[in-house]
Image (tube, grey):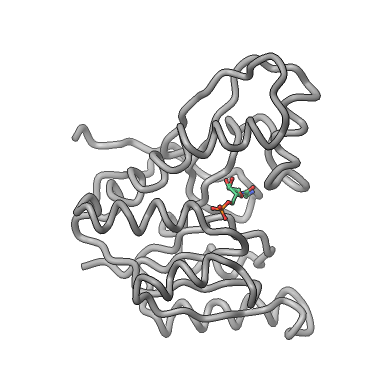
Amino acid sequence: MKNIVVLVSGGGTNLQALIDAEKRGEIVGGKITCVIASKPDAYALERAKQNGIKTRVLVRRDFADVHEYSKAMLDALNEEKADLVVYAGFMTILDETVCRAYPNKMMNVHPALIPSFCGKGFYGLHVHEAVLEKGVKVTGATVHFVTEVCDGGPIILQGTVPVLNGDTPEVLQKRVMENVEWKLLPKAVALFCQDKIKVENGRTIIEEQ
Ligand code: GAR
């Protein structure tokens, strides 16, 4: 059984989607064993507690710099014997030591179609604001492995939604979450737990289900 450690910073709706998928028996071979939050008041922590999942909190300002923070995170992941680390709305920067220690074992959900609207400064609602500002007609979300290049690791799954007249960033965010993120993140985690994702030359190959 693979230990899944989920990193969160906010509301935790993606964490909830993972919890619900696990409860439905869709994550064969894996179990969410710990949730680590970068903010003590993240509602995601409540969701974990309500479901009997161990929680930890690592706040960036309690550490001198990004390297000290990353070392503490790496220690925590090692203590939890993580087989898979999932960024589910985790908004705090870690240095390269963490993703190097877990190559192709850390995944992130990003609320746009990478390589568009990604990289530094593109997180949360800002992504949807940029999408509306540009006027693209299709957007979506991407689940990818985490490497030292921000939002640049191998793409695992992508899904799309239309951008509609009159959309606000909030309305678009909700459409992307409901139709793509909450479905694709649990799916990618399930594929990983069944060893169905291979990485070759920076690209993933998903074994047919
Ligand atoms: C999600 O939309 C996720 O894709 C995004 O933050 C939101 C977290 O919501 N992540 C990023 O922007 C990372 N670059 P949640 O806390 O309700 O899951």
**Considering only vertical position in the picture, is 163 above or below 59?**
above
The quarter of the displayed image where residue 11 is located: bottom right
| Residue at 35% in and 59% down | 19
Q: On the image, which quarter does residue 42 sit in? A: bottom right
Rendered position, 140 above or below 12: above
Give the mark count.
Answer: 0
The answer to whether residue 105 is left or right of residue 136 is left
Q: Position of residue 5 (x, y in %)?
A: 42, 68
Residue toward you, 192 or 203: 192
In this rendering, would 169 be left or right of 43? right
- Quadrant where the C terminus sits is top left
Q: Against 49, is 93 above or below?
A: above
Residue 200 position by quadrant: top left
| Residue under the point 55% across and 31% down | 175
Residue toward you, 14 or 151: 14
Q: Is residue 49 left or right of residue 126?
A: left
Image spot of residue 170 (x, y percent): 68, 37
Q: Position of residue 49 (x, y in %)?
A: 43, 75
Assign the N terminus to one quadrant of the image. Answer: bottom left
Q: Position of residue 56 (x, y in %)?
A: 51, 81
- Up-down relation of residue 61 to residue 164 (above or below): below
Q: Residue at coordinates 75% horizontally, 41% vertically from top-left?
A: 126
**Which residue is pictured at 45% across the width and 58% down the height?**
15
